[in-house]
């Protein structure tokens, strides 16, 4: 038998782990895109004029 409130703590811990994972991957994607620069298929305003 689990103690009262244990389920809530485990649920919160799981949500925080998922948030940390999302933040990590989003941050990694942003850093990589800044390091790589724009690719050849990206839209640029000066190409349309």
Image: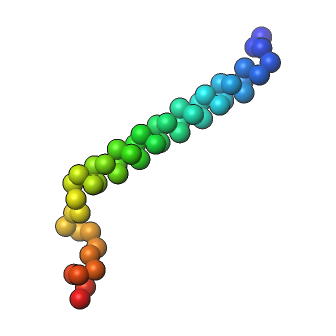
**37, above or below 9, in the image:** below
Could you tell me which residue is drawn at 68 percent across and 25 percent down? 9
Could you tell me which residue is drawn at 34 percent across and 49 percent down? 29
Image-based side of 20 in relation to 1, left or right: left
- Residue extending furthest toward the right: 4
Tally the marks: 0
The one of 11 and 36 positioned closer to us in this rendering:
36
Q: Position of residue 4 (x, y in %)?
A: 80, 18
Q: Quadrant of the C terminus?
A: bottom left
**21, above or below 44, in the image:** above
Could you tell me which residue is drawn at 53 percent across and 36 percent down? 18
**2, above or below 29, in the image:** above
Image-based side of 3 in relation to 37, left or right: right
Residue 2, by quadrant, is top right
Q: Position of residue 35 (x, y in %)?
A: 23, 52
Q: Quadrant of the N terminus?
A: top right
Image-based side of 22 in relation to 9, left or right: left
Q: Position of residue 44 (x, y in %)?
A: 26, 75
Could you tell me which residue is drawn at 28 percent across and 49 percent down? 32
């Amino acid at each position: 038998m689990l103690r009262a409130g244990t389920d809530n703590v485990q649920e919160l811990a799981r949500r925080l782990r998922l948030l940390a994972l999302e933040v990590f991957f989003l941050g990694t994607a942003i850093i990589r895109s800044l390091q790589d620069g724009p690719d050849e298929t990206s839209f640029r305003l000066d190409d349309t004029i």
